[in-house]
Image: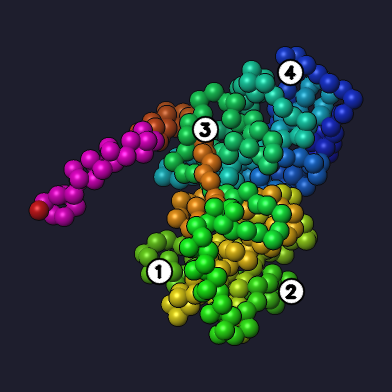
Amino acid sequence: MSLALTVANATNVEQNTRVSAFQRQFRIVCISGEARVSAVLKGLSPDVESTAFQSDTWLVNWFATVGRARGAEPHLMLATCKATGSFCLALPLVRWTSGGLTRLDAVDLGLADYVAPIIAADFAPSSNEMNRLWKSLLAQLPKADMLYLGKIPPMLGTRPNPLMLVNGLHRHRQRAWGTSLTAPPLDFTALGMPKKRSRELNNRLKRLQAVGSLSFRIAETAQEKDAAFAVMCAQRAARFTAMGRPNALDSADVRDFYRSLLDQYDGRSGAVLQTLSVNDEIIACGLGLVTTDAFLMIFPTIGGEEWKVYSPGLQHFRKSMEWTAGRGKRLYDFTLGSEAYKTEFGAVPTELYEIVAPRSLKGRLAAAELTVRRKIHERPELVRFLRNLLKPTVEGGK
């Protein structure tokens, strides 16, 4: 199929042609190569549904930075209706090699918090229909040892995620956390913050305001973005070094990726960098993604030890949530991780899921290892037993 025809099919949603879910048949096409995949993504209708991590801005910039640096080949599995030619679903993937295993993964490599397809605004398949589509899609995949999709959310905004209908879905080890916002002004105690904690943060905010001029702002000019991004990277590096944890922003390709996203914000969607400053010194940062109905916090950071008595990170979250509510967003998404402060801001967990589809003997062995890890993770008492069992070995047999 030509690229021009593919783009046309991807954007052609026939509103007056309805095909029964039991009769609908799909045409599956695999689009390969960065230029071709990017062209199709940019040609999709603006009313398609997905998460912020499958927007054309995220994907195209990822391909041009992280993807190129790590040799990840872009592919797009495109499903259209045979009867009408209308776009139904697209699944962005990358093929790469890790540990001798050729993998087909979501466009992620540790950076996307959610994995999902891109679907037409009117695509609502039955379970049978979705599994028939999925079977056809698997048959058209590029050659690889395994397909892996992790961190699958149940919803795409307000729409059900059709991947939840696929047979063989498993719960992922991680969960997401988000707070449903009310109309401004926000009442954090009404959201779920204990009154004592709210008073404490208010008192610390007053003391912080007494130190100097306090401001919360969005980096807008290129100079402001460069300066704030450098501060955010430095703050994160200091924190992760102190904790002995790997830091994704240590990689130049990852830094280039997130910095490029900041130039794509159009006032309605894209990436923004928020800063909380005292006398023009940035004491907290937050890089996040803006969608039509949510703000997703990706990288929150805080300044040095001298600011900790004021809880700059929590003060920043309050300002960020107020900014989000003021723009009519319904959800403040803290994304992955179960840090205690999230529940203080009224966040509730959402289970995430994964799909593992081995395509070779090596893939089946890798999938079996993932199954063992999943089963262990689902049994905390087994995790504790194994840790105790290995402890003498780790400590030299004592």
**Amino acid at dot 4:** Ala
- The crowding category of the residue bearing disc 2, from other C-alpha atoms within 10 Å (few below 14, some 14 to 19, many at least 20), is few
How many numbered marks does the figure carry? 4
Q: Residues at badges 4 and 2 in contact (C-beta under 8 Å)? A: no
Task: Measure the C-alpha gap from mark 1 to mark 4.
Answer: 53 Å
- Residue displayed at 71% across by 44% down: 37
Residue topped by disc 4: 21
Residues rendered magenta in the picture: 373-397
**Amino acid at dot 2:** Thr
Q: Residues at badges 2 and 1 in contact (C-beta under 8 Å)? A: no
Indicate which disc residue 77 carries: none
Q: Residues at badges 1 and 3 in contact (C-beta under 8 Å)? A: no
Residue topped by disc 3: 355
Residue topped by disc 1: 241
What kind of secondary structure does the magenta stretch mostly adopt? helix
Residue topped by disc 2: 221
When the figure is inspected, residue 221 is found, relative to residue 320, above or below; the finding is: below
Task: Measure the C-alpha gap from mark 4 to mark 3.
Answer: 24 Å
- Residue displayed at 78% across by 60% down: 266
**Amino acid at dot 1:** Thr
- The crowding category of the residue bearing disc 1, from other C-alpha atoms within 10 Å (few below 14, some 14 to 19, many at least 20), is few
When the figure is inspected, residue 214 is found, relative to residue 8, above or below; the finding is: below
Residue farthest along the left direction in this orientation: 398
**Amino acid at dot 3:** Ile
- Of helix, strand and loop, which one carries label 1? helix
